[in-house]
Structure formats: structure tokens, C-alpha cells
Amino acid sequence: MKNLSELFENRFFLMDIGVTQSVNLNGEAVEVGRYAAFSPNKGQKGHQAVEVSNDYRYLCEKYHIGADCVCVLNGEGML
């Protein structure tokens, strides 16, 4: 089975975790986006998260991510 870095080698991809998350920061709830854009690491293997947002269209347009490069997580893994 391939991992995400192998599947999207040298390409940006978008991870959809399915729900908007929040974290507690200094006693205050802070919203973390539902979608994360990942960029290939330059000169190395793997990817790194470059931006998180609740705006799917914005991330896809900004990073030129097509529908074939979107991973959707469900309770059992990716779809």
C-alpha cells in the first residue's frame, strides 16, 4: 500500500478531515480549519502542511489542487 507522500509525489494535495476542529489555547477555544493543503518538501521526500482553512475553494484555487488530489478522511480511513 502506498502512503500519501508516494501517492502525491511532487504534487500538492488537500486533506479533508470531515469536520471543523477546535483546540484550547490559553483557555480559549480556537477554530482550526477542516481542510489542510500539503506541499511537497523541496529536495526531500514527503510533504508538509502549508495552510489550514475552512474554505475548500480558496485552498484549491490558491494551490492549484484538482479533485483528483483531495483526500477525505472518514471513521475508517481515507475515501
Image (tube, helix red, strand yellow):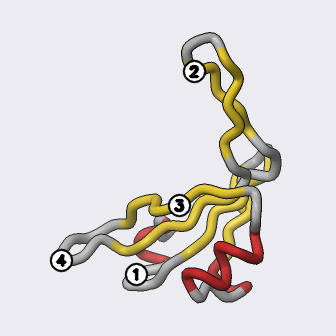
Residue located 67% across and 80% down the image: 60
Tell which tag, 2 or 4, sits nearer the viewer. Answer: 2
Q: Quadrant of residue 5?
A: bottom left
Tell which tag, 2 or 1, sits nearer the viewer. Answer: 2
Q: Position of residue 13 (x, y in %)?
A: 56, 75
Quickly name the residue at label 2.
Answer: 25
Distance from the alpha carbon under mark 2 to that under mark 4: 34 Å
As shown in the figure, which amino acid type bears the numbered disc 2? Leu
Q: Earlier in the sequence, mark 3 or mark 2?
A: 2
Residue located 67% across and 57% down the image: 53
Label 2 residue SS: strand
Tell which tag, 3 or 4, sits nearer the viewer. Answer: 3
As shown in the figure, which amino acid type bears the numbered disc 1? Glu
Quickly name the residue at label 3.
Answer: 51
Q: Is residue 4 above or below residue 76?
A: below
Q: Is residue 23 above or below residue 32?
A: above
Q: Earlier in the sequence, mark 2 or mark 1?
A: 1
Quickly name the residue at label 4.
Answer: 43
Q: Nearer the viewer, residue 48 or 62?
A: 62
Q: Assess disc 4: are there few (<14), some (14-19) or many (≥20) residues with their C-alpha within 10 Å of its C-alpha.
A: few
Tell which tag, 4 or 1, sits nearer the viewer. Answer: 4
Quickly name the residue at label 1.
Answer: 9
Question: Which quadrant, please, contains the C terminus?
Answer: bottom right
Q: Earlier in the sequence, mark 1 or mark 3?
A: 1
